[in-house]
């Protein structure tokens, strides 16, 4: 199977997703067996560095470097957590992988926990993912009957267990430090920094490796087929493929695995089948509403971490949302502003008050009651709150509004001039 032309992570396996036979037939658990048979931890890390795998959960941090930090930390008590707390609008790739390929995730988790010598290993799953969580538990039971997890793994005299942890289910709980707090029985609130990374101060205050679902699903294939196979596609600095959650105004929304560096246009046209109703593209969120949107003249931008960052936006977890020209951008921005307002944990005053005030001002403008003073206050508030929270939620809320106003200022001006939304019919005077 060619990585360049065939879906790799989304291949159809025989039977129900938790049944192990289909996965074994395509080389499943072979990489795990190599690790159990004596492949050195440093060799695993070296292969990941050679492959250039970067985290698929948002920041794009080099996976091998992160594993190395935990493995060789001066503190020798380590933990591992798979973050499946996906909750961002337009992002559903990890849910798809949980539902369809639980064994590939389990194998990736086992390799990760074993490599960093974790004392305990967990899979933190969004509580809304009920079917996915049950599939995962059934797959774990099948792996246990084969001696792949549990006591005396494959007769090698060591134990390793994966515990499924039902997550809090909020957007902010997906932030790794908030997730770790909730796992210890505390409110799901991001930690004040420093320390900055769970690799230094994670679960129970110990070095902890945290990776998301897609990142871990790449691990077995890289170790089984080699770094050279993985780097056949993608870009030099972002090799491999990415799972794109494509939604919004497209004919075929869904999860698509494409090489890193695919253009926004290719993703929309080849995968999404173009825009609904033959309408024109007005804007696209390449990485979800927490990153700046791009306009129709930027559709040839490459979808990888570095290219999008250079363009002033970001890939994030690749939740790509397409907006057509029949959509009011003020209304669309208000929708996501209300999301950020509702998902703020309230720990940081700038976030608690900032997200609320941003949503209030956006609603006032959309409802036709806004003034130029409100517009000025909106942008001033964005400048005040960016970068002030313990996590990036309030920054994302501010970036959303700034991007919308900058790119679609005329629509905002029309709301002020008409004292109503120009995308709705004017009231009939009687």
Image (cartoon, rainbow, N blue to C red):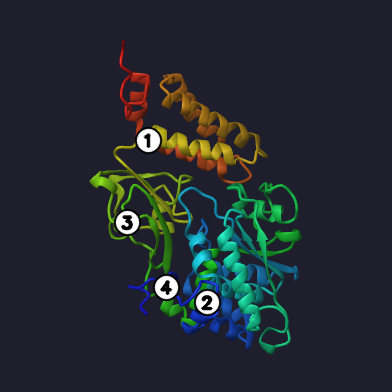
Give the Cα separation between the discs numbered 1 and 4: 37 Å
Quarter holding the C terminus is top left
Label 1: which secondary element: helix
Q: Identify residue for label 4.
A: 11
Q: Earlier in the sequence, mark 2 or mark 1?
A: 2
Q: Identify residue for label 3.
A: 272
Residue 17 image offset from top left, x and y in percent? 51, 71
Which residue sits at x=68%, y=64%? 208
Label 3: which secondary element: loop
Q: Earlier in the sequence, mark 3 or mark 2?
A: 2
Which residue sits at x=54%, y=51%? 87
Q: Earlier in the sequence, mark 1 or mark 4?
A: 4
Which residue sits at x=74%, y=63%? 206
Residue 282: quadrant of the picture: top left
Give the Cα separation between the discs numbered 2 and 4: 15 Å
Task: Report whether residue 248 is seen.
Answer: yes
Tell whether label 2 touches label 3 (CB within 8 Å). no
Residue 37 image offset from top left, x and y in percent? 62, 88
Q: Identify residue for label 1.
A: 329
Mark 3 is surrounded, within 10 Å at the Cα level, by few (under 14), some (14 to 19) or many (20 or more) other residues, namely: many
Which residue sits at x=62%, y=73%? 140
In the image, residue 264 above or below residue 23: above
Label 2: which secondary element: helix
Give the Cα separation between the discs numbered 1 and 3: 21 Å
Tell whether label 3 touches label 1 (CB within 8 Å). no
User: Looking at the image, is mark 1 or mark 3 nearer the viewer?
Assistant: 3
Q: Identify residue for label 2.
A: 220
């Amino acid at each position: 199977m060619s990585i360049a032309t065939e879906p790799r992570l989304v291949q159809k396996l025989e039977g129900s997703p938790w049944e192990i036979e289909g996965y074994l037939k395509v080389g499943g658990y072979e990489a795990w067996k190599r690790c159990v048979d004596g492949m050195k931890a440093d060799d695993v890390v070296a292969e990941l560095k050679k492959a250039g795998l970067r985290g698929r959960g948002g920041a794009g941090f080099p996976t091998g470097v992160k594993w190395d930090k935990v493995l060789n930390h001066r503190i020798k008590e380590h933990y591992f957590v798979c973050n499946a707390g996906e909750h961002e609008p337009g992002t559903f790739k990890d849910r798809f992988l949980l539902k369809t390929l639980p064994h590939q995730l389990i194998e990736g988790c086992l390799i990760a926990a074993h490599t960093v010598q974790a004392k305990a290993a967990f899979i933190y799953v969004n509580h809304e993912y009920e079917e996915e969580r049950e599939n995962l538990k059934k797959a774990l039971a099948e792996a246990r009957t084969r001696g792949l997890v549990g006591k005396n793994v494959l007769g090698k005299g060591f134990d390793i267990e994966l515990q499924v942890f039902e997550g809090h289910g909020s957007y902010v709980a997906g932030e790794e430090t908030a997730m770790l707090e909730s796992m210890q029985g505390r409110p799901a609130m991001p930690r004040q920094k420093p320390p900055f990374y769970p690799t230094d101060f994670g679960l129970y205050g110990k070095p902890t490796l945290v990776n998301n679902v897609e990142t871990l699903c790449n691990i077995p294939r890289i170790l089984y087929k080699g770094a050279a196979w993985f780097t056949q596609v993608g870009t030099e600095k972002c090799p491999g493929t990415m799972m794109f959650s494509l939604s919004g105004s497209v004919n075929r929304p869904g999860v698509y695995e494409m090489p890193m560096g695919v253009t926004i246009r290719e993703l929309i046209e080849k995968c999404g089948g173009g825009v609904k109703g033959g309408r024109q593209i007005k804007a696209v969120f390449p990485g979800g509403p927490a990153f700046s949107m791009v306009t129709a003249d930027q559709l040839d931008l490459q979808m990888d971490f570095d290219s999008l960052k250079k363009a002033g936006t970001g890939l994030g977890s690749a939740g790509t949302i397409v907006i057509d020209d029949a959509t009011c951008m003020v209304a669309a921005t208000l929708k996501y502003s209300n999301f950020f307002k509702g998902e703020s944990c309230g720990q940081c005053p700038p976030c608690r008050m900032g997200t609320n005030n941003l949503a209030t001002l956006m609603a006032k403008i959309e409802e036709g009651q806004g003034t130029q003073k409100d517009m000025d206050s909106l942008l001033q508030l964005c400048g005040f709150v960016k970068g002030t929270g313990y996590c990036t939620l309030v920054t994302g809320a501010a970036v959303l509004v700034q991007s919308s106003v900058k790119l679609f200022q005329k629509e905002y001006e029309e709301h002020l001039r008409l004292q109503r939304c120009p995308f709705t019919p004017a009231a009939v005077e009687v």
